[in-house]
Structure formats: structure tokens, C-alpha cells
Amino acid sequence: MFDRTVKHHPSKKHQFSRRQILFGLGAVGSVATLGLCGSASAAAYLLGREVKFSRESQTPIAKTATPTASPEPAPPHPQIVSRAEWGALVPDHEAINEFGFYSEDNPEGWFIYENELQDAYQTAIIHHAAFYEETDLRTVKAIQDLHRIDRGWADVAYHFMVGRTGVIYEGRDWTVRGTHVASYNTGSLGVCLLGNFMNQHPTDAQIASTRRLLIWVAYRLQLSHIAAHRTFNALTQCPGDNLFSRLPEFAAAANLQIGTAGYIPPDEALDCTCCTCNSD
Ligand SMILES: [Zn+2]
């Protein structure tokens, strides 16, 4: 399931990253991938406005300028069906509930992260689609239609979707803030498993692919936490009891902490030294 609202707006200017603050405060806990280099990836991100961010890179952008003595090996890149491959529609920025593009006057608009994605993201949030339509592909397209037509959004809410066959689909461009968890979208990566896990179980292939995806994306984005949608938004059953119970194994596999503690409200994450950022 999904939610539209975005309560906070992100900063425009950072002198230090959110992660740098977290590391400085010792608040991140077991994130163990400091110091890994990836200047090519950094360059790709900096070009992200013109060149689509590459999912193919195996190397995360460095958190620090000094590499560690023995960097961890990169986990394998899972196969991901691209938007073009599954026939995604281009985002509709005229959508009535997408609110146009982000600006200071429109903080809930379509927001493209300006900082490095490793600094933008903290938490993977697990969802279920709450329905299934005969095949994975039909369900993915149905989700995009649902979000665009019924919800009035520009695009599918989630960043990744995992089918019952184990196929992983690219969702909303991950350089863009999602619309999948009310009030907590900034810094939250949306991962949706296809099906309704209140009355069915995820398949073994689906669980295995989700594990691979999370291991890779947690490393790639240097996430610290994983949480169920219901943990952030108590009124939803998402991701269903039968998927909610699988979070501990996802967390263990991807070396993530469970819960909402990784979330950083954008206003609190404004690490500028000026005094205007926290005035609103
Ligand atoms: Zn959900």
C-alpha cells in the first residue's frame, strides 16, 4: 500500500551530509560500509539531472575521502527489469495530486534528491501491493495505473517491486522521492512485494529475490534500517502479517536494524550552519 503525504521538505543546501551528522553522533549503529570509494558513481550522480543514475555500478559513493584498509566486497547486482523493459509510462507531471515539481513554495512536489543518494536514503520500507492480477507484469502495470489514475500521482509510488516469480522491477526512479509512506517519504526507499500478504504468503522466489535486492541496495545506498510500512503508519496492515514476519531475516541478511529510528526528519537533517533552515 502507499501514501501520498510528505510532511517535511528537504534542505536545499548542505555543508555536511545527513550521514556525516549521524556518524558524528554515533547514531547509526552498525552501518559497516564507511570509506568505500566510488568516484565514477559519484560522477554519475552529479550528472543525474541529465544522465539517468546508473543502477549497474557495484561500488557505492565514498562516505569519506579516505578508503578503509580492507573494503568489503560488493554484493552481486540483482537482475532488475527496467522501466523501459516492462513498459512503464513516463511520469505525468500534470497529475492532479503530484503537485508539480518541488520548490520552496511547493515542498510536496516531485522531488529529485540533490545530495548523493547514499546521504539521501536511510531506510528500506517494505510494502505489499495488497492485490495480484494473474501475472507479475500485469500487476506491476496495474499498480502504476492505480497510482497515476486513481491516486493522481505522476508515477508508481515505490522504487522497486518484486513479483511472485522473483522478478524484480524498477519502479519510480530512485533519484526521486517516493510516495509510499505518509509523512516519512524523504530518505525512505520503497520496496513492494506483489500480492496480499494478509491472506497469502510470499513465494520462496519472491523472498529470495527480495533478500538479494535488499543486500545489494543496502550496500549500494548504505542504508541503516529496514521497516514495515505499518511500523511508520499504524493505520495500515501493509505489508501484511505474512510478510511482516519475514522482516527479521531481511534485516539480518542485509545487515540492517529494524524500526523507524533511521528516519531523519528533513528539517532536523538540515545540517547547514546558517540559521534560516530551521525557521519554518
Ligand atoms: Zn504499504
Image (spheres, grey):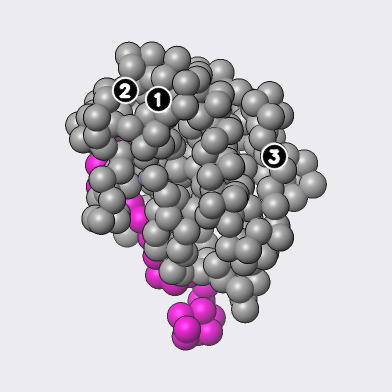
The amino acid marked with disc number 2 is Pro
Of labels 3 and 2, earlier in sequence is 3
Instruction: State if disc 2 and disc 1 touch (CB < 8 Å).
Output: yes
Q: Position of residue 258 (x, y in %)?
A: 25, 42
| Residue span colored magenta | 255-280
Query: Dividing the image into 4 quarters, which one contains the N terminus?
Result: top left
Secondary structure of the residue carrying tag 1 is helix
Of labels 1 and 2, earlier in sequence is 2
**Residue assigned mark 2:** 202
- Indicate the quadrant of ligand 1 in the picture: top left
Q: Position of residue 181 (x, y in %)?
A: 40, 53
Residue depicted at 39% across the width and 59% down the height: 182
Q: Is residue 260 magenta?
A: yes
The amino acid marked with disc number 3 is Leu
Q: In screen coordinates, is 34 left or right of 229?
A: right
Instruction: State if disc 2 and disc 3 touch (CB < 8 Å).
Output: no
The answer to which of 201 and 224 lies nearer the viewer is 201
